[in-house]
Amino acid sequence: QLQLQESGPGLVKPSETLSLTCTVSGRSIGTHSFHWGWIRQPPGKGLEWIGTVSYSGNTHYNPSLRSRVSISVDTSKNQFSLQVNSVTAADTAVYYCVTYLFTELDVHYYYGMDVWGQGTAVVVSS
Amino acid sequence: VLTQSPATLSLSPGERATLSCRASQSISSSFLAWYQQRPGQAPRLLIYGASSRAIGVPDRFSGSGSGTDFTLTINRLEPEDFAVYYCQQYGNSPPLLTFGPGTTVDIK
């Protein structure tokens, strides 16, 4: 059974770097057509896509966060990670890691984010 | 950009809920998904491809629509269906993902 688990500090100081890791179990992170991403949700607000890394290592980011965000993969540990630089209080949120299948053969098809981590709360405060 | 209406829908158990999601420009039905989020929980995939139910989703949930207008219908609301619902678009080129602001279905 595919499971995702976020880990990382729950408190980060303003201007510092937020670092989170998602450990994947039940599927190799390099499995063809699967993508791995990060979503966040500020308190009382909606969902915001942060970025995605594909099975082949390609990354794509939300344009509003691109200058401060980086997603990387460690295939040896079956993990992917998120870094957000120069954080402010606006980065306070629950951060979720997710996975989805996107096929690119004859027809492009998006199968939705079918597995989510439980989420980890990050507070930016001094 | 995705907009959802209404922002809040107040209904009684057993009633039907009709939630709307409108895109600012036409999108492929293959790239539209719906999620349910209960308080304190991670979102859960309900519908992908605009109308295909995810594994384990009861058949009282159905999705429809095309172009710029999409609908999530919940027949015969159960107590566990009172939650927030988000539509979400996959932008193919470049692959950017966007969520709507959500519709809260609460108990009348």
Image (spheres, rainbow, N blue to C red):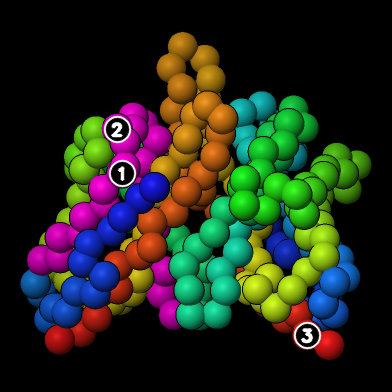
Between residue B65 and residue A125, name the one nearer to us.
A125
* Separation (CA) of disc 1 from disc 3: 36 Å
Is residue B45 positioned above or below B15 on the image?
A: above
Is residue A80 positioned above or below B7 on the image?
A: above
- Magenta run includes residue A53: no
**Dot 3 corresponds to which residue?**
A125
**Dot 2 corresponds to which residue?**
B26
Between residue A25 and residue B97, name the one nearer to us.
B97
Quadrant for residue A100, please give it: top right
Amino acid at circle 3 = Ser
Letter of the chain that mark 2 sits on in the rendering: B
Where residue A69 sits: x, y (%)? 76, 52
Question: Magenta segment range?
Answer: B16-39
* Side of B10 relative to B96 (left or right): left
Residue lying at 22% horizontally and 35% vertically, measured from the top left: B66
Where residue A82 sits: x, y (%)? 78, 55
| Helix, strand or loop for disc 2 | strand
Residue lying at 29% horizontally and 32% vertically, measured from the top left: B26
**Dot 1 corresponds to which residue?**
B23
* Magenta: main secondary structure: strand
The reply to whether dot 1 and dot 2 touch (C-beta < 8 Å) is: yes
Estimate how packed mark 3 is, as few (under 14), some (14 to 19) or many (20 or more) residues with alpha carbons within 10 Å: few
Where residue A36 sits: x, y (%)? 66, 44
Amino acid at circle 1 = Ala
